[in-house]
Image (spheres, rainbow, N blue to C red):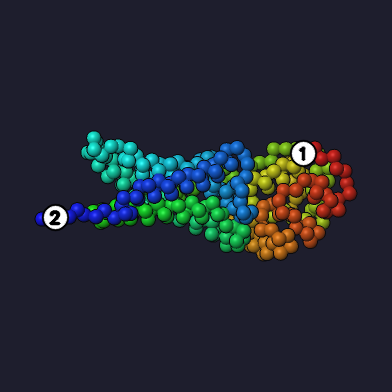
Amino acid sequence: MRSRRRQVPWMHRRSRYLIAAVGILGAINTGYITATKLIGTEAACPTTGCQQVLSGPYAYVFGLPLSLFGLLAYLAITGFALGPLLVNPDTSKQLRHNLENWTWLLLFMGSTAMMVFSAYLMYIMYTQYVVPFGAGGICFFCILSAIFALTLFVLTLMGRDWEDKGQLIFTGVIVAMVTIVGTLGVYAVPGSNGTTTAETAGATGPAITTTSGESEIALAQHLRAIGAKMYSAYWCPHCHSQKQLFGQEAFAYVDYVECTEDGLNSQAALCQEVAPDVEAATGRNFGFPTWEINGRFLVGAQPLNQLADASGYQGPRNFVN
């Protein structure tokens, strides 16, 4: 009588390769962002909001780029997926079997944690950036990473025949709870996102370290006199660069509008009202900093001479910064 062997589903035969492929794509995505952070350049973002998200307070953990941790997670997933395949099943059958079981559990736990954490980041992006700034607050790199994380979770579930589904669900719930509690705990710790304790409490950003010359002070006083405003965010690196151009003494005269909800003296509602006007007038997404001078909007950090020209400033221009 002819024996019949159980047909192994195609997905089960190829699942580890598919998981590894997605893991590599995720590593490329997060690796690119990490590289731009480490060398001090900006990612090629299609929207200004993308850069805002990547430079925001949630983009750092313990002073390191969050993307670095994402890169390590994707590399680990790739290693778990391909590791057992390096063991010869004919000569080391038991080792291969054990590695497959252990790594499947690690893949499930890792992909679950990544999916839950990505969902949290999507919530932050939507509430902190998309709601106040519309499409300009979308970070496509972040969405891509979230899609990769979800795909890894689905491929892991479909990649093998899980025998004890009850235990699997229990493990998934525990991992999800630990991930949520850990995430909230990390971001709740002062200084964990790369800011100091004083910055977290007051949300004022890095201190201005440059000094002002007479020209910087005169320009800042002129800008205040004509009602010019600088819409900004305490965590924005370009805004800090703009402050550095003025210097500590001069910037005290600038009418600074804080646009983030947790910023000191936040005027987020005013920023939301202005955002559509900025986009209509400039054809660009509302980004930080944005200057409003004599009814015109200038998006991005501006050289002091440019601000002087736009504001009709007639004083000295021997700017020292």
Residue lying furthest front in this view? 1
Q: Position of residue 266 (x, y in %)?
A: 63, 56
The residue labelled by disc 2 is 2
Quadrant in which the C terminus is drawn: top right
Q: Residue at x 41, y 54 (%)?
A: 151
Q: Secondary structure at mark 2?
A: loop
Q: Secondary structure at mark 1?
A: loop
Q: Position of residue 173 (x, y in %)?
A: 33, 54
Looking at the rendered structure, the kind of residue marked 1 is: Asn
Q: Residue at x 40, y 46 (%)?
A: 20
Crowd class of label 2 (few under 14; some 14 to 19; many from 20; radius 10 Å): few
On residue 321, the disc is 1
Question: Which of pointers 1 and 2 indicates the residue nearer the eye?
Answer: 2
Q: Is residue 284 above or below residue 244?
A: below
Looking at the rendered structure, the kind of residue marked 2 is: Arg
Q: Pick whichever of labels 1 and 2 is earlier in the sequence.
A: 2
Crowd class of label 1 (few under 14; some 14 to 19; many from 20; radius 10 Å): some
Q: Position of residue 122 (x, y in %)?
A: 50, 56
Q: Residue at x 81, y 59 (%)?
A: 294
Kindly report the distance in space between the C-alpha atoms of the residues bearing marks 1 and 2: 87 Å
Residue lying furthest left in this view? 1
